[in-house]
Amino acid sequence: VLFGGRSAEHDVSIMSATNVMQAIDQARYEVVPIKIERDGRWILQRFSADGSMENLASTGIQGALMPGGSGALATVSHAAEVGSTPSIDVLFPVLHGPFGEDGTVQGLAEIIGIPYVGCGVASSALCMDKDFTKRLLVPAGIPMARSITLQRKETITFDEVVSQLGAPVFVKPARQGSSFGVGKADTAEGFAEALSTAFQHDD
């Protein structure tokens, strides 16, 4: 079970993974929890029946999936000593946001040659980007809320937005999950503030 990650949803992912691991029948499956730290390191964890997790970072044990389709998980200590754990049969990503549900981890699993839970690379990447998602769904006749996509280098006034969408308006990063960076605006000042917040999470 892969969780944590480099996105703003790091802590949310930990809670989700805890729920997933509590639901897995430990008598049938051996769960290998791997936490991706905010800096990108993969750290092995221990998971107990009461739902608590023990971080093995203090021992310096990091994990690295090996390519070739064997599911081999190598462990590397701070002393550069290489070990191994039982082979991974399936990768269960419980990651939220960028570097998790946007096709990146899915692509890694494809390259390594290990089965994984969830959508494939293309669908993950497309659905993570709300602009691309709308470009696919609107022509297909699927009802969607009206929207305007704005990049950091572009400018638009609040009055221009209201003339197309009405007020209030909601501003959200195109490639961020949950409610991170979301803002509601019914004034020009509020709109500028909401844009500033959203651009902290995406371009």
Image: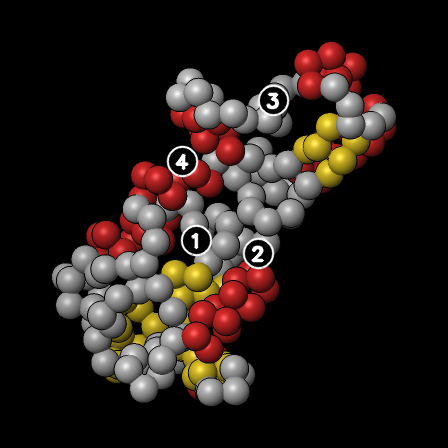
Q: At x 32% / y 39%, what residue is drawn?
A: 122
Residue 146's mark?
3
Task: Report which residue position mark 4 lands on.
Answer: 126
Which dot, 1 or 3, sits closer to the camera?
Answer: 3
Query: Quadrant of residue 43 in the image?
Result: bottom left
Q: Nearer the viewer, residue 151 or 80?
A: 151
SS at circle 3: loop
3D distance between C-alphas at marks 2 and 3: 26 Å
> Could you tell me the amino acid type at mark 4?
Leu
Q: At x 46% / y 58%, what residue is drawn?
A: 95
SS at circle 2: loop
Task: Report which residue position mark 1 lands on.
Answer: 100
Q: Nearer the viewer, residue 70 or 146?
A: 146
Task: Tell which circle, 2 or 3, labels the residue nearer the N-terminal end.
Answer: 2
Q: At x 61% / y 42%, what residue is drawn?
A: 201
| Above or below, comparing residue 37 to residue 111 in the picture | below
Task: Tell which circle, 1 or 3, labels the residue nearer the N-terminal end.
Answer: 1
In the rendered image, residue 11, in percent from the top left (x then y), is placed at 59, 64
Query: Quadrant of residue 30 in the image?
Result: bottom left
Task: Report which residue position mark 2 lands on.
Answer: 9
Number of marks: 4
Q: Is residue 191 left or right of residue 139?
A: right
3D distance between C-alphas at marks 4 and 2: 19 Å
How busy is the neighbourhood of tag 1: few (under 14 within 10 Å), some, or many (20 plus)? Answer: many
Q: Nearer the viewer, residue 55 or 101?
A: 101
In the rendered image, residue 169, in percent from the top left (x then y), is placed at 73, 28
